[in-house]
Amino acid sequence: MIKLLNLLQSKSILILFIFLFFTSNLLFSQGFKKSRFRLKVGVGTMYDDNILKYSDKYLNRFLNNEDEGRFEIKTYDDVFIKTKLSTSYYFKFFKKRKTKISASFSNNSYINNPVKTWNYYGVGLQQYFLKKANVKFSYSYIPSFYVRQFRQPELVSLYGYEPNTFKPYVFAKDNFSLTFQNTFFKKTKAELDFDYAKYYDNSYYTEYDSKNSSVGLSLEQPVSKKVKVKATYIFTNSDAKGFDQEGETKETADDSDASYKDHTFGLELKAKLPKVLKKKNDVSAKIRYSKRYFSSSHLIHNDPLHVGRIDNNLRLYFAYNIKLMKKTSLSLYYNYFVRDSYNNQGVYDEVLSEDKDYKQNQVGFQLSYTIY
């Protein structure tokens, strides 16, 4: 696992170095102008009532001190502190059209369960061709993200159902995206996104390594001077490795195949509110519903958590933002997530539901300050 993460980190550092080398040469050739530079810092905190997305079955086992070895956490809920640093700079490169570069870093630190702490790194390059038409390339990297403990079947065959057969599931992620934006009919904003992500799992779960490709289309339309509505559709195809031994293939291996196709539909409402104590403020509400179809071709008793599985995922996001001062703003958040899983073959349906269904609530705030 350490060698894998070191290799991924080296590749990601190389991508970041090439990006910084390219942009620094552009800045040097044109000269740095402070008025085009932005630097923003954010600090916030959020309470999460189900940090590992456990079903009721596993929440009860945790509370009853069952399944020794499964739970490498102190509490099933937690408070995490999020710090974010973002920066951007624009210059004129192609025929005096605006070119914008950006970079960001964020850290999510969990107070009671540091195993869940994770970092995010991102860079972007955005090029305008017309006043309201642009294309953006971005890359992001997550070095290590802890999911939870799972029981390893290979270890069970050696040791039986002992605590040491539970092993942590951790992944690293590279994400590349290309986004095209344009505004039609003066106020209708259209966005077309292409994403490609690679997930690298630790040595216990290499069969879950995957390549995810997605395409998304969104349209945003003002319905009044203060209200905007945005509709989104995203299709994702996830191709999981499906084997963990040399000489195997996805079809011949007896490992789980977590490949799936996902259809996501979204609707978002943004509204500016009357000023509060002469302060600008606004609210937003977003709903996302996805239908995920798993495509494992194994016999169902060999892969009961994926064969014939269909997930219904619902996500709700609410936010309130207020401009406290010229460079300082405050955001309040509430998020609600729920997943309902079932088997379209009517076999292992109850087992699947007990294992994968979950509900999750998050509430918090973030304070942002623009330094430049």
Image (spheres, rainbow, N blue to C red):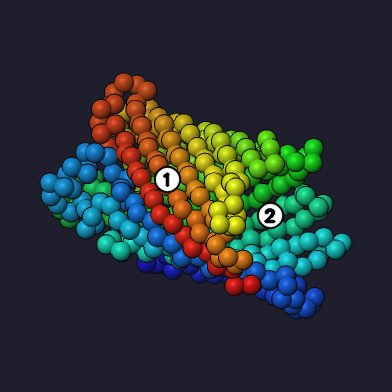
Residue bearing mark 2: 136
Give amino acid for label 1. Answer: Asn
Q: What element carries label 1?
A: strand
* Residue 340 occupies quadrant: top left
Q: Choose between 187 and 149: the one closer to the eye.
A: 187
How far is mark 2 from mark 1, CA to CA? Answer: 28 Å
Give whichever of discs 2 and 1 has the lower sequence position.
2
Label 2: few (<14), some (14–19) or many (≥20) C-alpha neighbours in 10 Å: some
Q: Choose between 121 and 230: the one closer to the eye.
A: 230
157 vs 90: above or below: above
> Relative to 347, is 159 on the left or the right?
left
Of tags 2 and 1, the one toward the viewer is 1
Residue drawn at 56 percent across, 39 percent down: 268
Give amino acid for label 2. Answer: Lys
85 vs 267: above or below: below
Label 1: few (<14), some (14–19) or many (≥20) C-alpha neighbours in 10 Å: some
* Residue 88 occupies quadrant: bottom right
Residue bearing mark 1: 335
Q: What element carries label 2?
A: strand
* Residue 145 occupies quadrant: bottom left
Residue drawn at 37 percent across, 67 percent down: 2
